[in-house]
Amino acid sequence: MSQFVVPKIITFAAWDFVVFASLFLVSASIGVFFAIKERKKTTSADFLIGGRSMTCGPVALSLTASFMSAVTILGAPAEVYRFGASFVLFFIAYTFVVLFTAELFLPVFYRSGITSTYEYLELRFNKPVRFFATIMYILQTILYTGVVVYAPALALNQVTGFNLWGSVFATGIVCTFYCTLGGLKAVVWTDAFQMIVMVVGFLSVLVEGTIQNGGPSQIWQTAMNGSRLDIVDFSVDPLRRHTFWTIAVGGTFTWLGIYGVNQSTIQRCISCKSEKHAKLALYLNLLGLWVILVCAVFSGLVMYAHYEGCDPWTAGFINAPDQMMPYFVMHLFAKMPGLPGLFVACAFSGTLSTVAASINALATVTFEDFVKYFFKDISDRKSTWISKGLCVLFGALCTVMAVVASFMGGVVQAALSIHGMCGGPMLGLFSLGILFPWTNWKGALGGVLTGFVMSFWVAIGAFIYPAPASKTLPLILRTDECIPLNVTSTMSTFTTLSATTAPPRSVLEDNWYSISYLYYSAVGYISCVIVGLLISVITGPQRGKNVKSLLIRPVCNLVCFWSEKYKKKCWCGVAHDEIDEELDFNGLKKDITMMPVTDKPEENKYENNSLHKPPPGYNEEEKSYTNSDVDKESRM
């Protein structure tokens, strides 16, 4: 590659602004459309969970768009560029995550007829456990959303010179606008549109990048020569940033905390008109995750081939690795007006979908877990207005939180670290309830508190005392083909830094604080489960006869299928072979109030446990509601 210097900031052409603005316009228009279309549906259930009438297609696209955010679009290619294509191993983690979510967690949540995921914790344990989990979820989601708002704003600032914080607030305003107007249906359909934009943006980069860099074989050879294709590293060292085990095991724990028990995911799944559609949405979503992952990895390889001899970061052309992708796009499409705008729209699509889904989920858990608890008799009209007000409130909080994200370093590691710190203990809490029938509320609360202490301890310690450079060192980055810009050596900056004498480090810093960020979730999960089970045994385990079978799903039951005796032991006395009279057809609540299960048998009652006939519009063969005009509230 010939020597070159490219200006730090390349401004948009007129067509770039047109393409970029169209994204915001279409997204806002979808919100307006559903606000008009759904204006006669005034219940909070219609606004927050779409009346439980969604189909698997748009929900699958929505799930993919929400969690493959700008963090992935900007951060993943930069990760591949610097550390190699081992990032592709996340396909293993994604597969396990979707499988566990669809077959283990979703059936419990869907059949319980809940709206907020944390309602389950009250049914299984008690109100304090539910409220604690809800508060932690709110804090986690606001912090994470701040990262995904900041990431594309940084990209836009880098490629156009736009005011960084002006971009942040514009993003927050648009998300809040269509989420508040159209509710969950607007969020889902806007996500579906934005998912298409994301894929088209990635494909445009891949096609043009491949053409300009000599074709697929040349790119592959360049990546191989640069050690970017050394994908599988079976080292069991937990201090190594990315190995097969950190990604496959640690990544599974991290993403399962995001998917398996996260309100944003479960809320869209339970908005489906049947459990079958909800499971299909998850499996179709897995295909979407694979597509985006492959696009991100190959974009990183194309970017490496383009800058093989002149790394813009080491050369000082950009300030941070997260700016690599937008900088590359401006190079690639320098003579193609409109395409830079398409890629930036791609990045913003990821962020709009994630932020809108988070705002909707935050509004849902706050309304269901707090507003309805303190204000018992709220009219349908008032509940809808309260839900919309909560959307505005959380939209503002998530936007402001983006300021904090500017101090958190690389967006991928920051985002996954947040989910690891919070997602692991939360996953452990729900696992205690679903997988272990003998867990009591004392064990659940003690376990989750321990999980949070352990995961926050290691994550905050790692932030204060970063891991040694030898554990996080990127692969070789060359600058010998650059026209010098205050660069005194053709070697990578990291090579120079590694040669300096590091200050002495304590055993704690060298080991505990240096653990891979992908293990934060596993640390929180394991601590939560072990301590939760120990406390339950010490304080008196929950009696199986006091636990409703729809609230648990013991995995150990799978290995006892040949013996009714051992099968019964696996369920620890829970009446697993009885039909739950509390469930309506298709697993939806009837006109009863499900009371929380306690240690006292006399309290484990329901206000009405008589059997009812199938409601109007219910198709027993399809196990779903076929009449869209049926009163949605009767299904809850």
Image: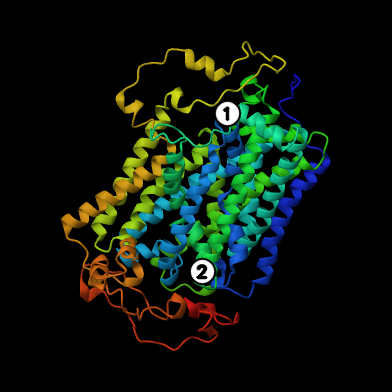
**Residue at 57 percent of width and 42 percent of height:** 71
- From the image, state whether disc 2 or disc 1 is nearer to you: 1
Q: In this view, which residue lies farthest toward the bottom?
A: 613
Q: Is residue 311 left or right of residue 504?
A: right
Badge 2 marks a residue whose secondary structure is helix
- Residue 629: % across, % down: 60, 82
Q: Are marks 2 and 1 in contact (CB under 8 Å)?
A: no
Q: Quadrant of residue 324?
A: top right
Quarter the N terminus occupies: top right
Crowd rating for badge 1 (residues with CA inside 10 Å; few <14, some 14–19, many 20+): some
Q: Is residue 546 left or right of residue 204?
A: left
In terms of depth relative to the viewer, which is nearer, 480 or 131?
A: 480
- The type of residue carrying mark 1 is Ser
Q: Is residue 297 left or right of residue 552?
A: right
Circle nearer the N terminus (2, 1):
1
Give above or below for 524 relative to 307.
below
Q: Quadrant of residue 131?
A: bottom left
Residue highlighted by disc 1 = 227
Q: CA distance from mark 2 to mark 1?
A: 57 Å
Give above or below for 518 relative to 256.
above
The circle drawn on residue 470 is: none
The answer, for residue 181, to whether it is visible in the render is no
- The type of residue carrying mark 2 is Ser
In terms of depth relative to the viewer, which is nearer, 416 or 358?
A: 416
Q: According to the image, what is the colour scheme of the structure?
A: rainbow
Q: In this view, which residue lies farthest toward the top?
A: 488
The circle drawn on residue 383 is: 2
Give above or below for 60 relative to 626.
above
Badge 1 marks a residue whose secondary structure is loop
**Residue at 57 percent of width and 23 percent of height:** 476
- Residue 410: % across, % down: 54, 34
